[in-house]
Every structure is written in structure tokens, then in C-alpha cells.
Amino acid sequence: MSEIDIRSIFKTEAKEIIENLESDVVRLEESSEDEKIINRIFRYFHTLKGSSGIAGLTHVYEFSHLLENLLDDVRSGHVEVTDSLIDLIFDSIDWMKGAIFSEDGTEVSENNREKLSSRIYAFTAGGREVITKETDEIKIAREPVESGAKYYNIKAFFKEDIFESGIDPLMIIEDLMSMGRVVSNRVIKKKLPSFESMDPECCYFGWEIVLETESAVTEIKDVFLFVEEENNITIEDETSNYRNKGSEEKLPLEKKIGEIMVDKGILTDKELNEVVTIQDKEGDRIGDIVVKKGYATKDDVNIALIEQERLKKKIELQTVRVDTIKLDNLLNLLGEIVIGQSTLTRIADEIDNEYGDELKRALYGINRTTREFQEQIMSIRMIPIGPTFNQFRRFVRDSAHLLGKEIKLIIEGGETELDKTVIEKIGDPLKHMIRNSIDHGIEPPEERVAAGKNRSGEIILRAYHQEGNVFIEIVDDGRGIDIEKVREKAIHLKYIEPDEEIAREKLLSFLFMPGFSTAEKVGDLSGRGVGMDVVKTNIDSLRGSVEIKSEKGSGSTVKIKLPLTLAIIDSMLVRIGKNRYIIPLLSVVETIRPAKDDIKTIEGKGEVLLYRGEFITLVRLYDVLGIDAEYHNPWEALVVIAESEDRRLGLLIDDMPGQQQIVIKSLDNYITKSRAISGASILGDGTVALIIDIFGLIEELGG
Amino acid sequence: MKIIKIKEETFGIKHARDFYNSLKDELIDNDEVVLDFAGVKRIDLSIAQIIIAAGRSARKNKKTIKLKSVSENLKYQMIIGGLKL
């Protein structure tokens, strides 16, 4: 592995670690005595130290070593968690980010590092004055090892020219040993020649180590991440040889949240059975049900969730790191298979004999396998949104400090999973809306107190699954949006007439129009009227939607609806004239042929269809799309009843050739700017069909 | 007796050949060589290997190599590297 490869792997790993690190430092600021958080921060710096050393970033290695010492003093209680310590850690993280992620590290000021180092020394020196050092003892196991530990026999033999790649095996072994208690350590020196004949730049040593540790085998493997390919590394789990069978401890098993609450005495078995029955019927989360029923508080549920997370981490998982590009390629290939299947299905339909039937049967089997294949790939692509949410902890903290506000960020539903493409693209829109909440929503402490609120404001980032979609909410308890100001601005910009009656939701949706801002002054963070339109565009590009709800004085909620996946969807193929279009099946309620009497024209609403007792707008798609249709009378044609966000409409089509899975391909703006079209797909016969986006269509028709 | 003072904070592969050559020379000329590690914060495996090989050679020739001013951290690294201190 070349040095560049190692650096690139290190950068990926470091990005993840630093995001977690920043999130945990904010948590530490809120709970300064939480030992778990302190230990985690220590381990992050320790890992950064080890990996940066291997990646040849000695300045980062040395600096993270200082920070590791600082955190060691914090966890031993010799250094107190104070505001200045938190500031120092954040400043240090910023320096490390520059050193790791700038192209060649030259943007990083050495002078700054020295200043930071002096600040760290000031803390550690002050703390260490009282430490009684046991100088005779070499501390091998830095981490206390708990009773659920495992025993690994690790053999590491390095190639002779390993030093040429800038890797020091000693550092790797040191890192390994820091993961637990070293039961035995044998340095294999038999290859070492005589002093006179040795090559001082060759590696001759190997190790055989038995390590007692709580870490999973994947974490042990991670220590050898950069060297495992070209060196002889073996890791064997020898727990059964070392553990006394009589006292063998039960391995942790993944537990359901309800079981944990029963174990903790929060719920009785009877109450658990009751809430499980409710969950089966209503599909709500157990946590929500127990709170609703009054069996537990939100805090109780959070405690149980934390315990569940802890147990999950204890369960050893065999995992591999895979480059996300490979996953994308795999999905693209699957997309091609789906298109190929559609072609075969079309051919099978055209063969009007027993071979056609056989082909159809064979294709049915392949379709089932492909669907399972797709579900598996999708599950690999699904990642929790928690890390994305967590990265805002520091942003909220720093922004609040800058504005002299007190804001607490609460994260709910971080375990909610989304397609990785959606996660990658949602970060910027979320940041923009959080920034708005900080800048315009949450009031300064004095203003909040005067309004009878807590000094400290709250921003809740919440994610949850519902009806095949993922919802993300940004909720703040700030001053809310002044709807009258929005109205005035909308009149000023001539979006509405001064005397026009308009729904509150519609007024608030103007906030997503370019240049629309009701902020009285432009802040450092926001208020320029630039951004919310970009937020909406970004979310639209994800086939999602966004809406705002707000009450003056109480706060605002921005609700984003996103599809679970962007790649392959179930769809309904429809024909209008000679053209075929695709409607996502999730948007389809049913397809009907209406009676002539059910079609009316209502003043102010246009053409409507009486559907199940209510009038819904009838959309002649051929008019909207500017094409010819076979039928113009709705009672001769078919009407697809489609819905989006509780709004229904009827779409006039000629025919419905069938349902199928389609691979979504994006369309550039020069092909169509219509919001009613969200993409395209290649059909089985190789032709392209456009995808009709119901939400976009409703928006384009003016709500 | 010869004292070799090591000045580098991080003493590793970059200095291994020079260190090896000077240690080899001093072991020819002296019965006792002292390696002064004051100020050294870290060594790598190449240095540990040289010290171990030199120690074996010195014992065979009835000579001595001593280590001086070894910090706790350095002692820890040397033990992991196979030195007995």
C-alpha cells in the first residue's frame, strides 16, 4: 500500500473520528462529569495519534499525543472540565482538521500549534503536580477490562522493508496493547542477525501477544488496517481457552427496548405485553406508546435507548469497510439488470406460445431474486442519520456563543436510516435551517426570560420513518415567524394581492421563494433571503418536500419529507397518446373510470371529479405536458387517483400498461424545468419514460 | 567509557544507519558505551533492534552497553520492543 493510499484511508477515518469527537466534546460541555464521554474522547485522540503516526503525519501524531495526555489527566480527575478546557479542545480539533485535511498541511500554522501546545502544557502541568507517579510500574493496560472480555492470540510478523513505507511496527503494537490487558507478550527475535551483519534499516522482529480486551475483533483488525495486506497478521479468538467455563459470562445479546425497560424495572411484564399489542395494531414506537400511556417518562425511555445502544456495541459484528463507489457501481449494475429484465418481460409477452409461458415463469423467478438482491443492496446503502445530526452539535454551540444565546440541541431518532446519497445531500439544507433557527428563531436569554420561557432555547432535530418515507423535523421553541410580516412581504413582492385571502401554510411557503426574507437585519449567520430557496431546490432534487409550521411566540417546525431511497422504485406505467409516463406507486391511491355525472366544473376550482364523496381536481395530463391524447372525455379514459401530503388529484390517462420496478435516472435542467417531472427511466424496449412527480405537479398547478 | 548523547526527540529510522555506525565504532574502541536518552520522547523499532543486537554483541565481547535517562514512556516502548530494563 502506498503512502498516498494510507493517507487517503487515514483521512476518511479521521473525518469520521473528528465528527464524533466534536459531538462528544459538546456533550461533555453539557455533562462535564460523564466518564463515558471522557473515555470516548480519550480514545478518539488515542486512535488519531496511532493512525496519524502510521500515515506519516508526525506533527499530528505529536499533537494528538499531547491531547491524549490531557484527556488522560481529565479522566483521572487531575484536570477539571471547564469552559476554557472545552475551548482549548475545540481549538485543538480545528488545528488538527487543518493539518489533516489541507492539501499538503501547509495551511497549518506551526506557530499556532506551539501556542496550543503551551495551553495544553499549562493544563497538564497544573494537573500533574499532584500526581503521585508509580515510576517502577510500567502500565500495560490503560483501559480497565471488564468481565465480558475476550482473549485474542495475535501474531504479527512484518516484512523486512516495512520502514520504507514510513510505518513503525512498534507504534502498531503499542496501539494494540493499549486496547486491553496484555496477558503475554513474546517478541520473536530469531531473525535478528548479528550486530555486525545486520541492516539497521530492516525489520526483523515479530510479536505473539495474548490480549484480554472488551474490543471486538474488528477493532483489533483496525489496528492493522494499513499493514494487513502485505504483512503476516493473524488474530485468533482464544476466549474459550482462557475463560473458566464455570464462571463463563453470558455474551451480551441484542435486546429490544421493551425488554430493557422491564429489566430496569421501568415496565412490568404485563405493561410490556400491553404496549406490544398496541404497537402491533398501530405501528407506533414502543417508546412513544409507554410515554403516552404514562408508564414511563421520556427520560426513562432515553435511558433504555442508551442501554440498548451500549449492548449493540458489545455485540461483535464481522464487518468490512467497503468503498462507497463500489456500492454505487453495484447499484448501477443492478439497475441495468432491472432494465434487461423489463426487455425480456416485453419479449415474453410478445411470444404467444408455450415458450413464451416458460420464459415468463423463468422471469418470475429471476424477478423475485432480483428484488431480494435489490433489498440487500439497499440495506447496505442505508445508514443512520445520527452522525449527520451529531455534527451539528458543535455548529449550534459555536453559533450560539457567537450570538450570546443559550441553545441546547436535542437529537431524536438518530438511528433512523436513509439512503447514503440522501444523507450526503441533506447536510447543507439542514445546516441552513438550523442556522435560521439559531439566528432568527431562538431569542436572547433576557428576551426569553421576559417572555416567560427558559433562558436556554431548544432546537430539536428529529427523524422518523412513516409510510415509506423518512421525515426530518427541525423544531425550535423560539419566537416563531410573524405571519403578518410574511404577508406584507408577499404583497410587496406582488406574490399576492393586498386583499387576497390566503391560507397560512401557503403564506409560509413563500419563505422558500428566492429573495424572500422577513429578517429586519442581516446577521452573520443568515437573513439575506438567500438560502431557503436553495434549501427547497436541494430537497426537491432528492424527490422530497419541505414545509414550515410556525406560531408567533412559540417557535417553528420545519418538516422535510424524503424518500427512503433514490435509486429504484416501484412504479405505475401510464400511456397518454403515444407517450408513456411513470407515476411512483407510492403516490397512487387507485385507478378508476369515472361516471360522466361525476365530472363537474366548479368556479374557482376548475374541473373536478367526485371521488368517494369529495371533489378533487381533475388534471388533464395531456394539457399539462403539451401532448396529444387518445381520449379527451374522462368517462372514456382512465383516471389515476394520486396523492401527496394529504392532497389528492385525479390524473387523466389513456391506458395503464402495468406496474414495474424502474431505475431512476436524473434529468438535467435543460431537458425540462417542469417540477412535475422528477426524472426519467429506461423501459424494457429501450425507450425513455419521464417520471411524474405528484408533489411537484400539485405545486406547479398552484397548490 | 563513551557516552553517546541522542539529541532527537523522535529517534527513529531516519537516524538508524548513523546511530548503528557510530555505535559499531564506539563498541570497537570502548569497553563501555552509555546511550543517553535525555530529551528523547520516542524511539521506533529500528532503534530497539539496533540496541538489542548491539547488546548481544557487547556481551559476547565482554563489553557493556548502558542506557541512561530513559523516560517512563520510552521505557514502555523499549519493553514492547523486546528490551529488558
Image (spheres, helix red, strand yellow):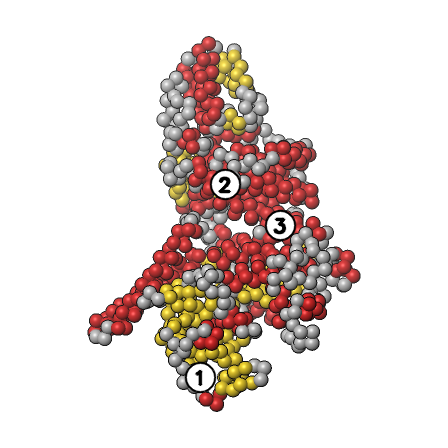
Quadrant location of the N terminus of chain A in the rendered image: top left
Position of residue A361 measured from the top left corner of the image (x, y, whole percent): 27, 70
Other residues around mark 3 within 10 Å, as few (<14) / some (14–19) / many (≥20): many
Q: A372 or A175, which is in the foreground?
A: A372
Q: State left or right for residue A478 relative to residue A178.
A: right
For badge 1, the amino acid type reads Pro
Determine which of the numbered discs, if any, sits on residue A394 in the image.
3
Quadrant location of the C terminus of chain A in the rendered image: bottom right
Residue at 62% in and 31% down: A133
Determine which of the numbered discs, if any, sits on residue A634 in the image.
1
Residue situated furthest top in the rendering: B29
Other residues around mark 1 within 10 Å, as few (<14) / some (14–19) / many (≥20): many
For badge 2, the amino acid type reads Met
Local secondary structure at mark 1: loop
Position of residue A204 measured from the top left corner of the image (x, y, whole percent): 39, 27
For badge 3, the amino acid type reads Arg
Q: Can I make out residue A577 in this image?
A: yes
Q: State left or right for residue B31 relative to residue A340.
A: right
Q: Considering only order in the chain, which callout, 1 or 3, is on the residue closer to the N terminus?
A: 3
Other residues around mark 2 within 10 Å, as few (<14) / some (14–19) / many (≥20): many
Which residue is label 2 attached to? A179
